[in-house]
Amino acid sequence: MDLIPNPDSPHSDHSGGGGGGGGGVGGPSNSPHCFASFSTATPGAAPSSSSSSTTSSSSPSLSRYESQKRRDWNTFGQYLKNHRPPLSLARCSGAHVLEFLRYLDQFGKTKVHTQMCPFFGHPNPPAPCPCPLRQAWGSLDALIGRLRAAYEENGGKPESNPFGARAVRLYLREVREIQSKARGVSYEKKKRKKPQQDQQHPPPPPAAA
């Protein structure tokens, strides 16, 4: 899954900032668990054969969200196949989703300071430190949202959706609180200011005849 920062989110996914709320989660290409979905062609790229060109032109182009959701779903499916022992989607539970999220931490790019670190709670550390890198809360939260929707779109029942399990919600809440304290970043959304009508300029008077 590619990491695509959301420009609308206040959390950018890098070592000194917050987590990207609308992005996916990515892994290195040399990882033994690297999935085939990472190497899929970019949507909209020119196909090599005329037959595939006809097919692609007749099918509607997917939005950025739908393309990301499809890649995330394929990647999770490959993760289940590579699981030891292999897991079927029907047997997947919230506990397996948590294993998947913890597995993704090894590809994280967000510095999460420990309580012993002098930069604990510092939003902009002035120097590097040996604290671990993790997946940003915003990236995980957006990822779970896409996978939860994809599960039901692929025939799963809402009441058995492992991505909506209580354990997953509690885990995301815990990650949010830990990263907020460790990096001194507030995750509260800013309220949008409503336009004030009385401050608008009145229309110019009509021109004299």
Image (cartoon, grey):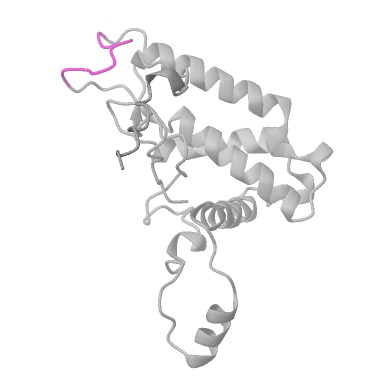
Q: Residue at x 48, y 28 (%)?
A: 137
Residue 157 higher or lower than 98, as above or below: below
Residue furthest front in the image? 209
Q: Nearer the viewer, residue 62 or 38?
A: 62
Q: Residue at x 30, y 38 (%)?
A: 208
- Is the magenta region chiefly helix, strand or loop? loop
User: Where residue 53 sits in the image (x, y, percent)?
Assistant: 50, 85
Q: Residue at x 36, y 56 (%)?
A: 30
Q: Which residues are magenta?
A: 118-127
The number of numbered badges drawn on the structure is 0
Residue 156 lies in magenta, yes or no? Answer: no
Quarter of the image holding residue 143? top right
Please indicate whether residue 67 sits to the left or right of residue 157 in the image.
Answer: left
Residue 106 higher or lower than 178, as above or below: below
Q: Is residue 5 visible?
A: yes
Q: Nearer the viewer, residue 55 or 96?
A: 55
Q: Is residue 85 visible?
A: no
Quarter of the image holding residue 112? top left
Please indicate whether residue 86 sits to the left or right of residue 51 in the image.
Answer: right
User: Where residue 201 sits in the image (x, y, percent)?
Assistant: 34, 26
Q: Residue at x 37, y 17 (%)?
A: 185
Q: Quadrant of the C terminus?
A: top left
Q: Nearer the viewer, residue 154 or 190?
A: 190
User: Where residue 166 sits in the image (x, y, percent)?
Assistant: 72, 25
Residue 200 higher or lower than 178, as above or below: below
Residue furthest left in the image? 127
User: Where residue 135 sits in the image (x, y, percent)?
Assistant: 43, 33
